[in-house]
């Protein structure tokens, strides 16, 4: 392997995502729910550094407490890439976590996608984006969108993706002090599973509901409380199954005012939504951040 020191010295971003809308329009025979959703990225990121390991092993510099290293999504992603290509290289990964776990922002899925994209480059494997998305889907339904790297309209279980342009705005995100169990929400008897399919034009005209909202608020009161507080400043929404709620603002001034007012009570993030993922932007520009 020819080591490109600039690439290996880089910190690779793993951005957050928002679900601007989430409809459940059916269910497959295997139990997976059929969705319609709109993904957009947030400039808030985890960061991953990579170091070549001559032994061929895949390891983490700082494994997550309570998580078996081989079960970590980043390690699974790297090993999956090795298995799919016959690659014998090893790597030690250092993940700096900024995204809250269990918040519906896709942190684990985004980390896995960044590992696939970065090691495809670092190991010079030359797999297509489509192949990386296919591998990513076997790790989790949200991984393909992070590999794809552009705001998108998604259907199926989230793997049928087409790019979409939506307004890029300032965003305030609240992470309530709870961890929403996605499986529990999708197994709830009272969950709506028969929403009518809509078109992109319906979404842009304002049909932006999240079918998980009522169930999550019923079972996790702190999510409901966060929505109420954030709604005082702008239209507040749930991303995915939560627990994070978010609101978009057309000016930095309004977003900062909301952030300042809420930060004494809540764990709050202030950022910008973007249509092109910071990971894709870095690769396209060749501007690798060390």
Image: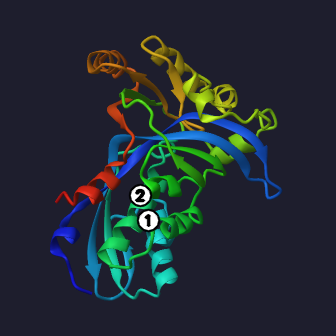
Identify which residue is drawn at 46% across, 11% down: 232
Q: Quadrant of residue 16?
A: top left
Q: Position of residue 266 (x, y in %)?
A: 40, 25
Q: Is residue 127 above or below residue 169?
A: below
Secondary structure beneath label 1: helix
Identify which residue is drawn at 37% across, 74% down: 59
Identify which residue is drawn at 58% across, 62% down: 137
Mark 2 Cα-neighbour bin, 10 Å: few <14, some 14–19, many ≥20: many
Number of numbered tags placed on the structure image: 2
Q: Nearer the viewer, residue 259 or 167?
A: 167
Q: Is residue 187 left or right of residue 219?
A: right
Secondary structure beneath label 2: helix
Q: Position of residue 42 (x, y in %)?
A: 38, 39
Q: Quadrant of the N terminus?
A: bottom left
Q: Quadrant of the C terminus?
A: bottom left
Q: Is residue 149 left or right of residue 236?
A: left
- Residue 88: numbered disc: none
Q: Is residue 217 left or right of residue 41?
A: right
Rounded to the nearest angstrom, the CA distance separating label 2 from label 1 is 6 Å
Q: Does the CB distance between marks 2 and 1 fall below 8 Å?
A: yes
Q: Position of residue 164 (x, y in %)?
A: 49, 41
Q: Quadrant of residue 61?
A: bottom left
Q: Earlier in the sequence, mark 2 or mark 1?
A: 1
- Residue 74: numbered disc: 1
Mark 1 Cα-neighbour bin, 10 Å: few <14, some 14–19, many ≥20: many
- Disc 2: which residue: 111
């Amino acid at each position: 392997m020819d080591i490109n020191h600039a690439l290996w010295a880089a910190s690779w971003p793993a951005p957050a995502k928002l679900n601007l809308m989430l409809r459940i329009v059916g269910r497959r025979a295997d139990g997976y729910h059929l969705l319609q959703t709109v993904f957009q990225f947030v400039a808030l990121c985890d960061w991953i550094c990579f170091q070549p390991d001559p032994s061929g092993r895949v390891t983490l510099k700082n494994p997550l407490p309570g998580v078996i290293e081989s079960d970590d999504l980043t390690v699974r992603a790297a090993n999956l890439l090795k298995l799919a290509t016959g690659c014998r290289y090893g790597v030690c990964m250092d993940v700096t976590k900024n995204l809250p776990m269990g918040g519906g922002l896709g942190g684990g899925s985004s980390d896995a996608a960044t590992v696939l994209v970065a090691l495809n480059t670092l190991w010079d494997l030359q797999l297509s984006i489509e192949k990386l998305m296919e591998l990513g889907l076997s790790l989790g339904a949200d991984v393909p969108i992070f590999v794809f790297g552009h705001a998108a309209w998604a259907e199926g279980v989230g793997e049928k993706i087409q790019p979409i342009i939506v307004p890029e705005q300032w965003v305030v995100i609240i992470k309530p002090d709870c961890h929403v169990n996605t499986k529990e929400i999708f197994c709830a008897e009272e969950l709506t599973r028969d929403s009518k399919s809509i078109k992109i034009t319906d979404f842009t005209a304002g049909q932006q509901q999240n079918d998980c909202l009522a169930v999550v608020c019923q079972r996790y009161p702190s999510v409901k409380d966060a929505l109420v507080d954030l709604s005082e400043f702008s239209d507040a929404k749930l991303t995915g199954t939560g627990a994070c709620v978010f609101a978009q603002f057309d000016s930095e001034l309004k977003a900062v005012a909301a952030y300042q007012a809420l930060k004494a009570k809540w764990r709050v993030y202030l950022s910008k939504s973007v249509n092109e993922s910071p990971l894709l932007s870095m690769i396209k520009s060749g501007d690798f951040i060390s």
